[in-house]
Amino acid sequence: MQAGGVLVLAGPTGIGKSETALALAGEIPAEIVAVDSMQVYRGMEIGTGKPSEETRRGVPHHGMDLADPEEEFDAVRYAEAVSPVIEEIRRRGRWAVLTAGCGLYLRVLRQGICEAPGRDPEVRARLLEQASREGAAALHTRLAEVDPAAARRIHPSDVRRVARALEVFEVTGRPLTRWHQDQEIPPREDWRMIGLDCDRQRLYGKIEQRIDGWLAGGWIEEARALAERPLSRTAREALGYRELFAHFEGRADWASTRELIHRNTRRYAKRQLSWFRHEAGVEWTAAQSDPAAVAREILAKAQAA
C-alpha cells in the first residue's frame, strides 16, 4: 500500500471500529483519528468508549479531548481542529485511520459544510419553545411540509437539527436541502471508505454487553460527577449520559434506565447504519470476532485495488 493515505472505518457503535483500527496500526504505519461527536469532550471517557491511556500511548490517537463538556461543540469546529492533523499524518508518510461513528462529522471532514445563512436567535428560540410546548413530533411534521428531504434525513427527536432546518427556511424562504444542493462539494476521492457491519442480533448483543460492562466499570460514577457540572446542551444530551442524569434526578428507576440505554443505543446504531448506507464510496466488510482478521482482509482488498 502506498504510504500517506486516509482509511475510514465507518459503522455503528459497538461494531469493532476501534479494535480493527488498532489491528491495522499493527500492520501499517498508522495513527488513529476518532470521528465521534462526544469523544471530543474531556472527562466523558467510559460512556463514549474512549480507548485507555495505555492504548493511546501505544498508538497515537487524535480527535479526542478537544473541549470541556461545558462548551458547545459542532462539526465545523471539529473539522477545523482535525483536518490539519490528518494532513500532517499524511505528510509524514503515515496512514490516518479514521474510526467514524458520527456521519455528520465525517461528511464535513470529506466535503466541507454548506454555508447556509447566519443564525437568527429569535427564530431559533421560538422554534425550540414550540418544540417544548407542542412536542418534537409537531416540529418535525412542519419540516416535512416545507423540506421533505431534510425531514427524511433528520430524526424526529433531533430537535436542534429540525429547528435549524426550519430556521433556514424561515429566514431565507429556501429549504436547507436546496442550500446543500447548490453548494455541494464532491467528497474526497482519495479517502478509502470501509463500512463494518454484522448480523443485527449479534450487533445488539455486543452493544448490550458493552453497556453493561461500562455500567459495572465506573460509568455511573463518571456520569454522577458530570451531572454536578454546568454542562453544555450538547454534552448533557449525550447518549447514555442523559438517561443516567434522568435517573439521578429521580425521573426513572434503575431497571428502566438500563433498558432505556440499551434501547436507545440500538436505535442509534440503526440510524448510523442507515446514514453510512447512503454515503458515496463505502465498501462494506463483515465485522468478525477477530479484528486482526478484518484488518488483514481490508489490507488485502486495498493492495489488490
Image (cartoon, rainbow, N blue to C red):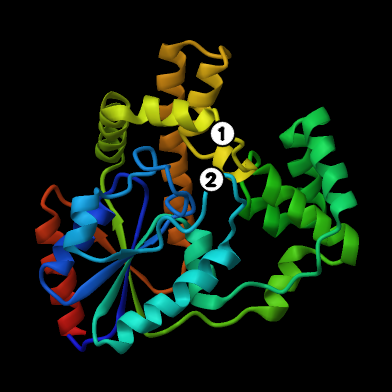
Horizontally, residue 288 falls left or right of residue 73, namely left
Residue at 38% in and 38% down: 47
- How many marks the image carries: the answer is 2
Please tell me in which quadrant of the rendered image residue 135 appears: top right
In the rendered image, residue 130, in percent from the top left (x then y), is placed at: 84, 36
Q: CA distance from mark 1 to mark 2?
A: 9 Å
Horizontally, residue 227 falls left or right of residue 19, namely right
Label 1 close to label 2 by CB (< 8 Å): yes
Q: Is residue 236 visible?
A: yes
In the rendered image, residue 34, in percent from the top left (x then y), is placed at: 37, 60
Q: Secondary structure at mark 2?
A: loop
Residue at 20% in and 64% down: 59
The tag on residue 69 is: 2
Which amino acid type is shown beneath numbered disc 2? Answer: Pro
Mark 2: few/some/many CA within 10 Å (<14, 14-19, 20+): many
Q: Which residue is mark 1?
A: 229
In the rendered image, residue 112, in percent from the top left (x then y), is placed at: 58, 76
* Label 1 or label 2, whichever comes before in sequence order: 2
Please name whichever residue, 155 or 9, is drawn nearer the observer in this view of the structure: 9
Q: Is residue 287 visible?
A: no
Q: Secondary structure at mark 1?
A: loop
The C terminus lies in quadrant: bottom left
In the rendered image, residue 159, in percent from the top left (x then y), is placed at: 69, 42
Horizontally, residue 171 falls left or right of residue 148, namely right
Residue at 69% in and 72% down: 180
Horizontally, residue 186 falls left or right of residue 175, namely left
- Answer above or below: position of 191 versus 286: below
Which amino acid type is shown beneath numbered disc 1? Answer: Arg
Mark 1: few/some/many CA within 10 Å (<14, 14-19, 20+): few
Please tell me in which quadrant of the rendered image residue 304 appears: bottom left
